[in-house]
Amino acid sequence: METESLDYSQKDARKGGVLESASKRVRMIFSVMASPNRIDILRILNTKGPLTYSELKALAGFKSKKESGKFAYHLRKLLRQLLVALNKAERRYTITNLGKLVLSLARQIEERSIIESGKMYVRTSNHTIEEFNSHKIIQSLVREASLPLEQAQKITEEVENKIYKFQTAYLTSSLIRETVNSVLIEHGHEEYRNKLARVGLPVSDIAGMLVSEEATRNGVQGIMNNTADAVFSEYFVFNTLPKDIADMHLAGEINIASSGTWGLLPDTIFVDLSELDSFDLQGRLPAVARLASLKSADDMLTALPVLIPLLSCEASSEVVLEGVAPALAKAKDTDDLASKFARALVASSASSIGPATTIAIPQETDAKQTNALLDGYKKYVEATPLPRIGLVLGAVKKESADHVAAAVRASGLVAIGSGRAANGIRKAAGGKNPPAAMTFHSLSINLPRLAYESNRDETYFRAKLALAIKPSLAASVMRKKIVLENARRGLLPAFSAATQSLQRATTGVIVNLTGAHEAVYSILGHDAAHGGVEVMQKVLKTAVDVAQLQAKPLGEEAAIAMVADNSGARFASIDSDKYGRVSLFQPLNATSYSQGMTLSGKELLSKGSDLVKECAGIDKLLNGGLAAIIDVTDLSTAEVRNAIEAASGLAFSRPRFALAVCVTCGKKSKASSDRCESCKSPHRLV
């Protein structure tokens, strides 16, 4: 018994010693936490990772020699208590797991003490932490939402009561704004809430962007562009557009193709570089101050890699550069010109993001010079998986037909037509040829919807179309004024410099029509061979006449176009969900309504005169432009040349040869191939 009693005594003594040692250790750790300097060292190591002595000392704020001893003292304390460890091989200090636990405990104690004191702090969008101040809510309600002061004080008092019930030490400015907006909605102040709403993206959307296929294809710049586009799209649709126009867009009656740049950029711009005596940004973009006169071939080839990226930032759809070919035509060595032109285009197209750029080659350009430019362009296309630069020829001469066909078969973006962009938009209505122009054409009307809701009555359909044009035109004119005002404030520095602060530029407002083929032939039931063409022309003439009539009171000139944007697929998707995929209403290709006119190259070769006559009649009516696409994907080089010649009666056409681009090796293959013809990969980007 005595032995057993002795054993228990020894155990109790050991236990007491352990407890005493643990208690002493805890006291020592708390003494470490008592120093803000030591807590800062732990925070730095937790955030930055392993650091050398000198790195840690500098980051902790001990920069002078006099403070070296103080820093060494604090670091020694942390090392002794095993909160920091030294990797002797690398001579770097790291925070230990115990150190992380102590740091977490310090943070919890700090937050709890703030709660007990009744103070709250706000993590602001300016990346600062400030003490909560309810007066800032009042100021925001009065300044941003235009709420009367007395009402703002009452709303703020209610918001403050809610916030103090949250039991959180740190608020965020977005949480406060959400709380304010919820109180405004509870009191029926929807209008004030809309003015105060935060525009942004959910966390899940951003996380999805970072791992999307597009992110790997377009890199960080693509993610930034998509984020900005989403934010500005929400802002312009819900805060700038009139409510009736916003509702029409959301319902699928109209479509705003470039909603993210609605009030920032025009859609297509035309710039005649031959009119430039010099290009001077006057410090608005410091990276590029001034370019000399662009009269010689060498000056132009040097300027293109600068001008194309600059101007591409100032349009949402397309940039058309005129006056390039006359300068390049002064080059004496055509072989050398082809190589230099190809290199200039490659240097101009480092980014796959942004609008297309089109270089105009006028009809009067010498055939040899034209062929040299076409050959250089073909080299550029062959070296570029997805070319963003195209050519528009005033006409195709016999000597250049084979060169055009070769560039097209290489998947080049080649269009034929004078005074047009590659998307089919006219530079100016009525045959005018100003030095520069900006056009607004991203608002499209859903013709199949109007036809379907007209009970197959052509007269009723045209009346509904006339009613839809008026608000669409008013919204486009409003947009034009906003963009011009922003341009005068300096938001379009390159275009302003090229047009002498917009003095030499004209502007055009164009309403786009989507799904005309489905509306007239599929829904209204007219046969193209028995009067359908006449009905189509009557519908388009109504649209043009109404647009011109409605534009006069607004002091504008308006036009109607049929060109491609993203509205065809969106309208088809919304209408299919709304009405079901009934055969009467189903799009011809089941995924998108028609935009412009697409002509089969094979049909053009067999019965070209009828197709050309129909297309030419429509193009003549549409004063805003028509995108006439000739599909030559299945044609040989000789057949492509013949198809282009057969379409020579059209004022505008763009032959299209579809190729697929492999995302693995970047090589091009036939669009019909299941695998890359080069590396056999099944992953393709069309």
Image (tube, helix red, strand yellow):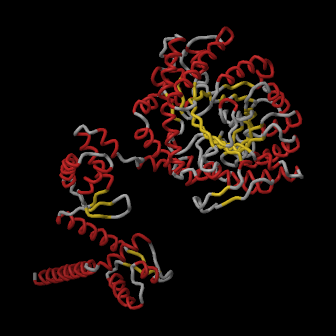
**633 sits to left or right of 83:** right
Closest to the observer, 147 or 34? 147
Residue farthest toward the left in the current orientation of the protein: 1
Q: Residue at x 73, y 44 (%)?
A: 322
Q: Residue at x 51, y 35 (%)?
A: 477
Q: Residue at x 64, y 48 (%)?
A: 499
Residue 399 visible in this rendered orientation of the protein: yes
Closest to the observer, 427 or 504? 504
**132 sits to left or right of 76:** left
Closest to the observer, 220 or 187? 187
Count of marks placed on residues: 0
Look at the picture and state if 30 lies above or below 490. Answer: below
Look at the picture and state if 190 lies above or below 582. Answer: below
Look at the picture and state if 182 lies above or below 596. Answer: below
Look at the picture and state if 598 lies above or below 262. Answer: above
Where residue 528 sits: x, y (%)? 66, 13
Q: Quadrant of the N terminus?
A: bottom left
Residue 223 visible in this rendered orientation of the protein: no
**24 sits to left or right of 466:** left
Quarter assignment of residue 438: top right
Where residue 565 sits: x, y (%)? 59, 34
Where residue 165 sits: x, y (%)? 19, 53
